[in-house]
Amino acid sequence: MNEKESFGAYIRKKRLEAGLTQKELAGQLFVTESTVSKWERALSYPDVSMVTPICAALHITEHEFFTACDDDQVHAQEKAAKRWRQVTTGTRKFFAISYAVAVVVCFICDLAVFHTLDWFWIVLTGCALGFCFTNLPFLFRTNRLLICLGSATGCLLLLLLACWRYAGGWWIIGGLAITAASLALPWGWWAVWRFYGKHVLPLCVGVLSLWVFALLAVIWLFTGGDWLVSTAFPLALAGVAFLWAGFAAVYWLPAGPWLKAGVIALLATFATPVFNSLCDLLLMDTGKPRFLAYFSVGDMLARRAAGNPDWVNQLTFQIMLVCSAALLVVGAAAEIRRRTRT
C-alpha cells in the first residue's frame, strides 16, 4: 500500500469510527461528497488549509493526520489525564457533600438536643478548615497559595475561638499565641517563595531553624519551668544541626547521588544515638546505651545474653552503619572515576 492509499484508508477508518457518512463529513468541511471520496480512494490529498477542520471532525491530532496512524502514546496520556480529572473531581465532590452533610446534621442535632448552637460552631469551622485544603485550591487559578493559606489561617483561628466559646477558660490566650507562632512557619515559607526568587530552599531551611526556637520560647512563656534553656534549646540545636548537615549534603555537596546517599544514611544512623545520649546528659540516665555503645558489638552481645531488648536497636544501628559505610565507599569510588575521566 503506497502513501496515498494508506492515507485514504486511514481517513475512511476514522470517518467510520466517528459515525459519519461521506456526505456528512463533506457538509462539516464545506466540500463536495466526491472530494471526500477522492481522499478515501487515494486519488487526491486534502488542501493544507483543510488539515485542522478534518482533524476536528475526525477527532484526531495533526500528527495522526500526517502519519496516517493512531498515536497510541498521546491517546494513553489523554486517557490518563481524563481519569485523573475524574478522580480529582469526584474527590472534591465527595468532600463537599461530606462537609455539607456534617454541617446540616450537626446543626439539626445541636438545636434538637440542646436547643441552642454551641458545639455546632466547632464542626462548622472544622469543616471550613478542611474545605480550605480539599476544595478551595481548585476554585482559583491565580494567587492560589496566598488565598488558601489566608483562608486556612482564618478558619484555624475561628476554630480555636469556637472551642474556647464552648469550653471556656483562660487557655485561649496561650492557644492563640502558640497557634500564631505555629502559623509563622507556613507564612514565612510563603514570604520567602514570594519575595526571594533565588536561594529559596536554604532560606526556607533557615526560617524553619529559627521557627523551632521561637515556637519553643512561646510555649515556655505559657507553661513556665526551667526546661527551655537547659533542655529544649540544646535538643533543638542538635536537631537543627542534623537538618543543616543533611541539607548541605543534598544541596551543596559537589558529589554524585551515591556519595550523597551515603552521607544522608550516616546522618540518619547517628541521629538517634546522639539524641538519646544528649537526653541522658541533660535529663537523667534513661538506661539506654551510650553513644559509642550503640555501635559496640561486644556490648550488643552482652545485652542480648542478659535479655535486654535494647540489643535489637543496637544491632539495627550497627547494620545501618555498615550500609552507610558501603554507600560512602561506592560513592567515593564513583567520584574518583568521574574526576579521572574529566
Image (cartoon, rainbow, N blue to C red):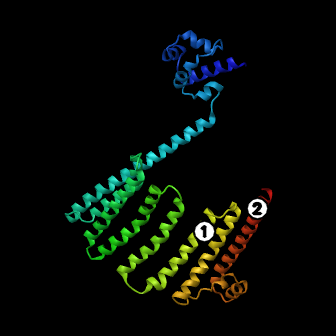
SS at badge 1: helix
Q: Amino acid at mark 2?
A: Ala
Q: Residue at x 63, y 76 (%)?
A: 270
Q: Amino acid at mark 1?
A: Gly
Q: Return the disc, 1 or 2, that comes first in the chain's sequence.
A: 1
State the quadrant of the N terminus: top right
Q: Is residue 134 above or below residue 168?
A: above
SS at badge 2: helix
Give the alpha-carbon distance from disc 1 to disc 2, as whole Å.
20 Å
Residue 280 visible in rendering: yes
Image quadrant where residue 63 sits: top right
Q: Horizontal and vertical percent for residue 299?
A: 69, 87
Compare residues 138 and 231 and report the one nearer the observer.
231
Q: Horizontal and vertical percent for residue 286?
A: 55, 88
Mark 2 crowdedness (10 Å alpha carbons): few <14, some 14-19, many ≥20? some
Mark 1 crowdedness (10 Å alpha carbons): few <14, some 14-19, many ≥20? many
Q: Is residue 292 above or below residue 331?
A: below
Compare residues 89 and 56 and report the one nearer the observer.
56
Identify the residue under disc 2. Answer: 334
Image quadrant where residue 171 sits: bottom left
Task: Tell me if label 1 and label 2 are in contact, CB under 8 Å.
Answer: no
Q: Horizontal and vertical percent for residue 93?
A: 40, 48
Q: Residue at x 72, y 68 (%)?
A: 328
Q: Horizontal and vertical percent for residue 77?
A: 58, 40
Left or right for 154, reference 31: left
Q: Residue at x 58, y 24 (%)?
A: 14
Left or right for 111, reference 260: left
Identify the residue under disc 1. Answer: 246
